[in-house]
Image (spheres, rainbow, N blue to C red):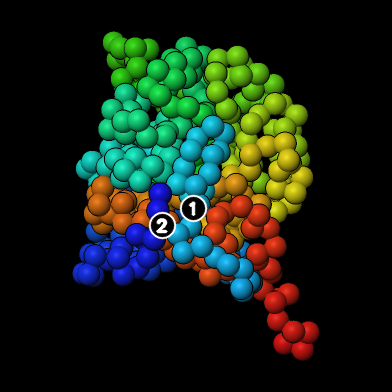
């Protein structure tokens, strides 16, 4: 992709966009349009929200230290290949279920917007559209599949086969959601989308659900799966012909185990703070994990990225690519496909501009570009 057309003036096309280009302010706008239930499910985090606050505080603690006179190209190329997937920049759409809560077109709007830009889309097991519908909407664009490993082996195998047949090239196994976290905003409303059948599209379209009396109950019996262990991973390897990435890794020990168990990558993530309250900021976990296993595993990152500058920080701390979570849903809520398109363009544009202003024409070799804030000020400050 030619990034020169994303420079602000040309990007705006001579008129002000309907949605702000200040992505950090997007949440406030999205709050105005989401129903109370949707807002309560999407925006808040687990418990007191300490992990989500820590995610943001960590981004604030790191500061970019731009370099000068480095002959930056007028037209830059941030494209890269991650686990066999080409992308215009090291950005992907994080797996997020229940997208119809944000907009009636749900995942179809998101995948269409991502596909038009070539940004890889990761399809959630808890989606409101099935593998096959999403594949049709996404055409030839790159897509990965995120597995919530069902307790039923038959359903698990069926999901893997359907994902493969529908062109999902890599498998993301999410590990931090063996149970749903303690989420007061939902508990206080006694609201869970799944109980109304929302987020069960992959299940309800599965042959294993045909003729089932109570599909929601059937789902409830196979969604929580806290019993998984490392020794289950070879099963996935046997049944998935393609890269496997473990999502939800925040400890160095688990990153090393992921390498020892022959995984291809990890996503350093705390699920946007939605699972464990009082957890380590994902960004604080990133550099240690990247240092330890970055030569053996593809290290990806999400949790707390709100704009292009945040993405630069995560890349500079060792992530090969960054996944975008809630900002995509805020764009979806505000404008459907056009809203997601807007958010992704802003991210791509700001990522490009921030890197260029820091002395980079591509997204390689960014280590050393950020410092911890306190180390950027003099000793007497
Ligand atoms: C509404 C919502 C639904 C999500 N659903 C899933 C999911 O189905 N599978 C998954 O692995 N992660 C899911 N996530 C977590 C995201 O993939 C990602 O880790 C998180 O949103 C990153 O944090 P951020 O939103 O603060 O950027 C969900 C997040 C949100 C906000
Ligand atoms: C619990 C899942 C089904 C969806 C999810 O990952 C989330 O809401 O964070």
First of labels 1, 2 by sequence position: 2
Residue 79 x, y percent position in the rendering? 49, 47
Give the quadrant of the C terminus. Answer: bottom right
Kindly identify which residue carries mark 2.
3
Kindly identify which residue carries mark 1.
77
In what element is the residue under mark 1? loop
Visible residue check, residue 346: no
Residue at image position (73%, 75%) is 375
- Eyeballing the image, is 84 above or below 164? below
Residue at image position (54%, 59%) is 361
Residue at image position (69%, 21%) is 231
Say if disc 2 is inside 8 Å of ligand 1. no
- Eyeballing the image, is 228 above or below 361? above
Answer few, some or many: residues within 10 Å of disc 2's Cα (few below 14, many 20 plus, some between 14 and 19).
some
Residue 84 x, y percent position in the rendering? 54, 32
- Eyeballing the image, is 337 above or below 223? below
Task: Find out whether the residues at labels 1 and 2 contact each other: C-beta distance under 8 Å.
Answer: yes
Residue 182 x, y percent position in the rendering? 51, 47
Visible residue check, residue 205: yes
Answer few, some or many: residues within 10 Å of disc 1's Cα (few below 14, many 20 plus, some between 14 and 19).
some
Cα gap from disc 1 to disc 2, whole angstroms: 7 Å
In what element is the residue under mark 2? helix
């Amino acid at each position: 992709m030619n990034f020169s057309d994303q420079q602000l003036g040309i990007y705006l096309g001579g008129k002000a966009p309907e949605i702000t280009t200040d992505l950090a302010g997007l949440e406030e706008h999205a709050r105005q349009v989401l129903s109370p239930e949707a807002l309560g499910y999407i925006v808040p985090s687990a418990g007191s929200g300490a992990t989500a606050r820590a995610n943001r505080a960590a981004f604030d603690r790191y500061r970019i230290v731009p370099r000068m006179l480095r002959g930056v190209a007028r037209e830059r190329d941030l494209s890269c290949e991650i686990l066999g997937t080409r992308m215009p920049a090291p950005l992907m759409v994080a797996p997020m279920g229940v997208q119809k809560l944000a907009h009636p077109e749900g995942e179809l709007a998101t995948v269409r917007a991502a596909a038009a830009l070539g940004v890889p889309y990761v399809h959630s097991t808890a989606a409101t559209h099935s593998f096959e519908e999403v594949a049709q909407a996404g055409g030839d664009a790159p897509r990965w599949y995120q597995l919530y490993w069902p307790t039923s082996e038959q359903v698990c195998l069926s999901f893997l086969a359907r994902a493969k047949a529908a062109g999902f090239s890599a498998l993301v196994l999410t590990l931090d959601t063996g149970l749903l976290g303690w989420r007061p905003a939902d508990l206080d409303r006694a609201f869970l989308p799944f109980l109304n059948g929302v987020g069960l599209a992959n299940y309800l379209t599965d042959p294993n659900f045909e003729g089932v009396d109570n599909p929601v109950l059937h789902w409830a019996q196979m969604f929580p799966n806290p019993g998984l262990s490392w020794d289950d991973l070879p099963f996935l390897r046997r049944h998935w012909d393609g890269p496997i990435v473990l999502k939800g890794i925040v400890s160095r020990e688990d990153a090393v185990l992921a390498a020892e168990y022959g995984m291809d990558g990890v996503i350093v993530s705390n699920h946007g703070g939605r699972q464990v309250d009082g957890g380590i900021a994902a960004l604080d976990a990133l550099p240690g994990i990247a240092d330890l296993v970055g030569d053996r595993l593809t290290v990806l990152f999400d949790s707390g990225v709100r704009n292009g500058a945040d993405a630069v920080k995560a890349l500079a701390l060792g992530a090969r690519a960054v996944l975008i979570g809630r900002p995509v849903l805020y764009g979806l809520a505000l404008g459907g496909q056009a809203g997601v398109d807007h958010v992704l363009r802003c991210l791509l544009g700001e990522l490009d501009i921030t890197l260029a202003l820091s002395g980079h024409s591509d997204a390689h070799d960014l280590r050393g570009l950020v410092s911890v804030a306190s180390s950027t000020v003099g000793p007497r400050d």
